[in-house]
Image (cartoon, grey):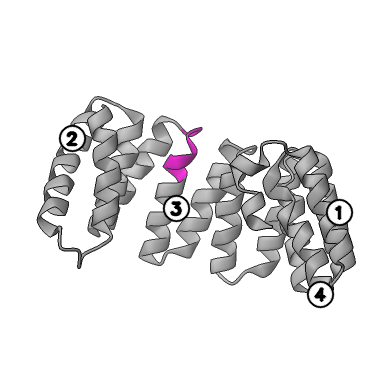
Amino acid sequence: MQKLIVGHSQYQKWAWKPDDKCGKFRVRVEVNFLAASRRWSKRNNRLYRTVLGDVYQAKGDLYEAMKWCRKGTEMNPEDWFNWTYLGRAYRKRGDHDGEIQTFENAVAKIPRNLLMWSDLSEAYNANGDLAETVRTYQRAIDASPNSGWGWSMLGKEAQSKGDYKAAIDLHETAIKSDPTKWWLWPDLCHIYESKGDNEKAIETYERALICTPLSKSSGFVSLM
């Protein structure tokens, strides 16, 4: 199985570079991994049902891609990547309604998975439905009040409208939900910077470094 996983990584790396000089190697990996995925899928391995869908999607065969990704969601609806690959296939086909319905089904099955809420909000946004995009943030908060993601996204929306006070309050609420999540801090820091309040920005950075002791290894400092 290890070879197959490595092969998948190599497959993705080369499949999206059609002008690369290693074209022969790309095709060889593609064919071998496609055959391996088929074998594993027939053995009811849920991972390779979805991986097979991903392979077909990269090949441009969206019909087969969606068929296998859908089987993955039916076999194990709690695996988020099944839904993500299926939603991507709908988006690539230009079917925004299908993409939205896919992620609506996903959040119904795994309501505490923030990736699914993020995918759903992106699907509504891509469809030009700003109202539903924002409503998705609130729905995510209702489903998982302590996740912080929904509050953070509402904060970004308020900032985009120039309402810095509301943005700061929303980001502070997000941080209070779990101060140890380093990715909740940078947006608040950047709001203070954009306002020219460098003293408050530095204070926020210092708070973040105290609350997220692993932030140096997780990438927070690189965002300063």
Asked where in the image residue 51 lies, by quadrant, the reply is top left
Which numbered mark, 4 or 1, is in the foreground of this view? 1
Tag 3: Cα neighbours inside 10 Å, few (<14), some, or many (≥20)? many
Asked where in the image residue 182 lies, by quadrant, the reply is top right
Horizontal side of 34 relative to 94 (left or right) equals left
Q: Residue at x 25, y 62 (%)?
A: 17
Q: CA distance from mark 4 to mark 1?
A: 22 Å
How many numbered marks, from 0 up? 4
Q: Earlier in the sequence, mark 3 or mark 4?
A: 3
Q: Residue at x 35, y 43 (%)?
A: 69
Residue hosting label 2: 36
Q: Amino acid at mark 2?
A: Ala
* Quadrant where the N terminus is found in the figure: top left
Which numbered mark, 3 or 2, is in the foreground of this view? 2
Which numbered mark, 3 or 1, is in the foreground of this view? 1
Horizontal side of 130 relative to 77 (left or right) equals right
Is 90 located above or below residue 71 in the figure? below
- Of the pair 125 and 75, the residue shown nearer to us: 125
Q: Residue at x 86, y 53 (%)?
A: 203
Q: CA distance from mark 2 to mark 4?
A: 52 Å
Q: Which residues are magenta?
A: 77-83
Residue hosting label 4: 162
Q: Earlier in the sequence, mark 4 or mark 1?
A: 4
Q: Where is residue 142? Give x, y as percent.
A: 76, 43
Q: Are marks 2 and 4 in contact (CB under 8 Å)?
A: no
Element on which disc 1 rests = helix
Residue hosting label 3: 87
